[in-house]
Image (cartoon, helix red, strand yellow):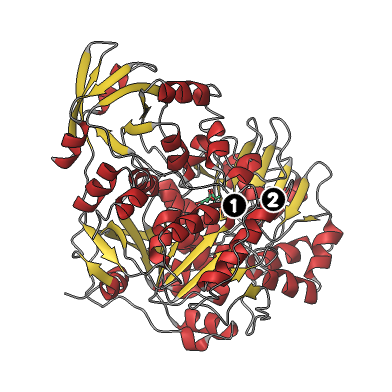
Amino acid sequence: MGQNIVEKVLSAHLVSGSLEPGTEIGIRIDQTLTQDATGTMAYLQFESMGLDRVKADLAVSYVDHNTIQVGFENADDHAYLKSIAQRYGIVFSRPGNGICHQLNLERFGKPGATLLGSDSHTPTGGGIGMIAIGAGGIDVAVAMGGGPFYLTAPKVTLVKLSGKLRPGVSAKDVILKVLSIYGTNGNVGRVLEYGGPGVATLGVPARATITNMGAELGVTTSIFPSDEVTRKFLAAQGRAGDWKELLPDPDAAYDQVLELDLDKLEPMAACPHSPGNVKTVTELAGIRVNQVLIGSCTNSSYRDLKTVALMLRGKKIAPDVEVGVAPGSRQVVEMLAREGLLTDLVAAGVRILENACGFCIGNHMSPGTNAVSFRTSNRNFEGRSGTRSAQVYLVSPETAVAAALTGRATDPRTIGLPVEVTDPAVFDIDDSMFLFRETAGTGVPGTEIVRGPNIGEVPKGKPLPEKLNGVAAIKVGDKITTDHIMPAGARLKYRSNVPQYAHFVFESVDSEFYGRAAANRDGSLDNVIVAGLSYGQGSSREHAALCPMFLGVKAVIAKSIERIHRDNLINFGIVPFIFDRPEDYDLIGQDDRLQIDGLSLAIRNGGKATVKDLTRGVEFTVTASLSERQKTILLNGGLLSAVAAGALK
Ligand code: MIC
Ligand code: SF4
């Protein structure tokens, strides 16, 4: 039988296992990316592995998240990252160059290659035909060192596109439609492969918008074929030599097929507070909008921002709306400027923001109290904008402009149809803000590593105890995101300093958690997190496992746990237990004493354990389904400890 694209790329990179869905496989990683917020930890971990250079074909270190530089911390982190890049053979993308995913697509992405990134939106690379996966920093550190990345062999869904998007409807509406069908949970262990005749009507940036926000589905990744459109994009980026065709075999099989007619789609919006809470813009018509922000790795390409500029040309934004535009890369800014499009934005009353993550991560531009913010980014979790009471809607650039002009939720097709913008035949290319290209792969031994006072150490976990002598330190509900567990925004600057950052674990959910958890730990009790469905959605930030580990968390017991976070928990020695009967969740109360006799034995024997709730006098069973490799990691107290103990092959 023929192969689909996912099987083709995975089998060409397979180093262990077979493509039997649900089983563990190891794959070779060609390219890695890190960004500064996850990068400092990833490189501290890389350093602790004792290698003398990176071994992946290409490793790039981007600085795009913490560019705000209030205080010394961000700048110190940048200096550390730069010196590490020079020392170990990593390409360094300077602050000001742009957002990692947009840049990787423009300058490095290759059809048929694998990419592992310490950021959950790494699947953006799927738009150019890569298997591009988000992971915790330590997994990326291992891949930089030439080690395999382990994942569950996925089930593959074919999303079969037909027709062509009508004017005013764009790629964001496609992925919002998919989110409205599949939701944000229950999709773990799956990859979406796009196909069908509609694919040829979508440019590479449009495809990248779709694979980027596929992250919100909780799938492992999403991928498009590599075709003539891909070839033209790469040629326009001066990289025709990186192109290769990647199509499914005619008799390729899929686990599931979703048919989507692009002609039938209409403008959509993800409503507060979940990317899966999707409605049509028509349904929202009339809602007053206070803020419009356009940018982020989802919608900041040349095509998107030129569309925005042309829609705003000769017009003024509504008096009660503040509007900001953050381009995705320096290439995009330069091209907008050369073509006079920046002038259109400024003349319309737009605030021009830095070409970085910025507002998307809550770094700035927080909306006012109860304000409605329309954004082209990919996540609208409660509080992520920096304002707890804000109502954030996720929309296409076209819908964002319609709101900017009218001050209300407005179907962009009713304000005069936006012009269709296509990619240029040649992009402006200037790679001067990528440093150390000439020493990529080899590095410069002897480079002094710059460590400011903000650069802490990576805490190492202790071997799993024989018995869990625990307490339910917190009980949370469904869909707790990593933004709930480890806030970003104003707290981002502590990413390189675990003891400091740990003060903010669950800050927005329960501000007393830190004190309670630290007291339990210091009183020799093991902390346990009790959670509902889809625990750990969203970001790849391993701090959501690392800081709880630092606070003595030994287990999470949840109804379900999302992929990247589950891997991060294991990497930091926290057992990811799932209730055998979801209703047992109701038995436990916060602060209950929980005990598992023979915890390490249970892990060795396959992961099934009985939990005694000593406070209520009840017991129930839980399971952590683990591969042999994962068991070894957990028993040793995490990946670094397992490697140090020589326990992993
Ligand atoms: C995000 O969009 O939440 C982030 C910030 O890019 C994260 C990474 C991080 O927390 O540093 C992600 O998506 O993985
Ligand atoms: Fe940056 Fe936002 Fe994209 Fe995360 S989702 S990488 S914060 S732009």
Of labels 2 and 1, earlier in sequence is 2
Mark 2 closeness class: few <14, some 14–19, many ≥20 residues within 10 Å: many
Q: Label 2 to label 1, Cα distance in Å?
A: 8 Å
Secondary element at tag 2: strand
| Residue under label 2 | 293
Q: Seen in the image, is 539 located left or right of residue 382?
A: left
Outermost residue on the right side: it is 347
Q: Quadrant of ligand 2?
A: bottom right
Q: Position of residue 312 (x, y in %)?
A: 77, 60
Query: From the Cβ of disc 1, is ligand 2 less than 8 Å away?
Result: yes
Outermost residue on the front side: it is 446
Residue at figure coordinates x 42%, y 60% from the top left = 140
* Residue 453 position (above or below residue 558): below
Q: Amino acid at mark 2?
A: Leu
Q: Nearer the viewer, residue 646 or 266?
A: 646
Secondary element at tag 1: loop
* Residue 134 position (above or below residue 387): below
Location of residue 54 by image quarter: bottom left
Location of residue 390 by image quarter: top right
Asked if residue 429 can be seen in this view, the reply is yes
Residue at figure coordinates x 55%, y 47% from the top left = 456
Q: Position of residue 139 (x, y in %)?
A: 39, 57
| Residue under label 1 | 377
Q: Are marks 2 and 1 in contact (CB under 8 Å)?
A: yes
Residue at figure coordinates x 21%, y 54% from the top left = 22
Quarter the N terminus occupies = bottom left
Residue at figure coordinates x 23%, y 48% from the top left = 632
Q: Amino acid at mark 1?
A: Ser
